[in-house]
Amino acid sequence: MSETTGQTSGETAAPETGNGTQERGVGMRILGALARVREASVLLVAVGLAIYFQSANSAFLSQQNILTLSRYAVPYVVIAAALCLLLICGEIDLSVGQSFAFAPIVMYLAYDKLFLVLPLAVLVGLLAVALVGLINGVITVYLGVSSLITTLGMFFLLAGLCVTLTGGFPATPPDANTTTRILGEYAWSGTIWAVVIVILLQLLLSRTRWGLHTYATGGNPLGSREAGVSVARIKIGNFMLCAVLGGFVGIIESFRISSIDPLAGGPQLVLLCIASAVIGGTALLGGVGTATGAFLGALVLIILQNGFTLQGISAYTFNIILGIAILVAMILNVYVARLRGAGRV
Amino acid sequence: MENGNNSANGSANGNDFLRAEGVVKNFGAVSVLKGVDMHVKKGEVLGLIGDNGAGKSTLLKTITGFHRPDGGKLLIEGEEVNLRSVAQARALGIQTVYQDLALVNELSVFHNMFLNSELTVGPFLNNRAMKEKTARYLEDMGVRIPSIDTEVARLSGGQRQAIAVARAVYSDAKMLLLDEPLAAMGAKEGALILDLIQRLKEERGIPMILIVHNYAQVFDVCDRVNLLRNGRIEFDRPVGETSVEELTEIVVSEYRKARQGKPTSG
Ligand SMILES: Nc1ncnc2c1ncn2[C@@H]1O[C@H](COP(=O)(O)OP(=O)(O)OP(=O)(O)O)[C@@H](O)[C@H]1O
Ligand SMILES: [Mg+2]
């Protein structure tokens, strides 16, 4: 019927494909730039802060302080990046700070009471938090409870379990051996783990089907399901990944400080990590974010905290600055979202 | 209801690609499909019409495995299938353009084009191959998109629809289900898509179900038309044996009857 129409318009269309940049509004271009440089701008803030603190106190960039800082940053950096995955697919895990405390306790019990060899005991600890993630995911996905509530419940449940299982007293992890050195006793091992984990998470997000489906699930859950994406699998998988990484970094931390503390983790840890992800550009409503962004967000917060401590500024001042940083980051997010909305027809 | 039992075309035979028998679908207390008998022959384009809310999209989503039917059965090429997921229907070669398009705003054009059928190298996405193919498909369809790297959120309604159509059409489908694929299209683009549907039918003999509200378009490309009303297929004719006027009359007459039954109306 309209064979000729098809051909002529096909011809006119072809050369113009990919040539519409000038049609995009200025707002769109600013948005594109903002989205692309989000990580860069957070990195810039981190570097700026480092320079400032160094000039204020030359101890800041001393080898000793860098080591302290990087070891201290490990749990925050890893949990922020892991949480980021979950946030991108539209969910949240408030209990991850508790998985952080729970995994080393289960590991310790498996080692001390069940007499398992340490690597096996570590595995048992990780399996325990994998189960925690599975329960979080199943309740959220199949029973339709908001993950905010599911993981809030899990938060208290685990907090109670941790204290009950240990009698409330910190335990001492096994003596130094190869496993404990690999997992955190060697000065830089935690840092190396953290960097490797963040890189792997970023690869997972931006280079694999799992990552793409994580974005799709958060961006348009219904549409993803219509396209055949297994939204349930993606969400449950990310709940498990988040809990396991939280637990793993908890085990690393317990070897670093040579103590298994039932009161470790807690709300401060998870809230700071959520803040890190948000500052790093993760949208709490899903669909947007990067692991590197979350990593850099955590780095900024840790540098702030450490720098203030060196300057003798109180934790309260840190909280004020943190509060302002989160608000600014969120306002920026809303602004970006609005620009984005304007692009929609 | 004068055409109520006109399902003479529906007698069983081996030529059917798809057959629905007594398909029932309820949403809670609301019964949307009350026993749909429908079939699509191999190489045939079936037009599905009906009022807003008649259940056309629901019927389509039941065939794609998105909804699980509460009763009845589906047969594909003579074999009964029990679809548990969209992925399963897609594996059988059933591809769909959903009314809501099922695009992810945050993802680029080419990632949307290959959503859930991504090209990979080992464990990694093969973005380059996906970009190349996307560019080729859109060019072939005569669709203009600023860039295949842009997020879908930044495209116009018609451009978004074109991507959804291209995704289904260029997927090696054995059957296509198109839920108002022309709704957001301009006249020219709509004609291009109809043309494409015609080509797929003639060159590859792909059976399709096409939901449209514009009856003239039904006569452009469809072989047969079904009217879904009151949860059933109430009218089933080859297009050669009916007309836009008749279809309009049938749809409107029901409405008139309903109005006459209600003294307070108007
Ligand atoms: N997921 C759902 N939950 C509850 N009710 C639903 C759901 N999906 C559809 N319905 C209801 O089923 C009925 C049929 O909807 P459907 O979308 O299939 O209609 P349609 O024929 O495609 O209409 P339109 O021409 O407007 O697209 C409507 O009354 C709708 O409210
Ligand atoms: Mg519909």
Image: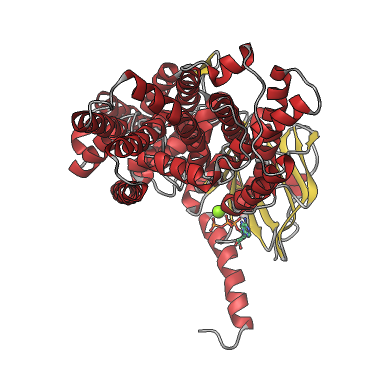
Pick the residue in front: A343 or A82: A82
What percent of the width, then of the height, locates residue B156? 33, 44
Quadrant of the displayed image that contains ligand 1:
bottom right
In the picture, the quarter occupied by the N terminus of chain A is top left
What percent of the width, then of the height, locates residue A156? 64, 51
Pick the residue in front: A86 or A168: A168
Residue drawn at x 33%, y 18% as measured from the top left: A63
Res B171 → quadrant: top right
| Count of numbered circles in the view | 0
Q: Would you say residue A65 is visible in this rendering?
A: yes
Pick the residue in front: A88 or B8: A88
Q: Does residue A154 appear left or right of residue B115 in this picture?
A: right
Q: Does residue B179 appear left or right of residue B110 in this picture?
A: right
Residue drawn at x 80%, y 49% as measured from the top left: B72
Residue drawn at x 59%, y 36% as measured from the top left: A100
What percent of the width, then of the height, locates residue B143? 35, 33
What percent of the width, then of the height, locates residue A243? 60, 35
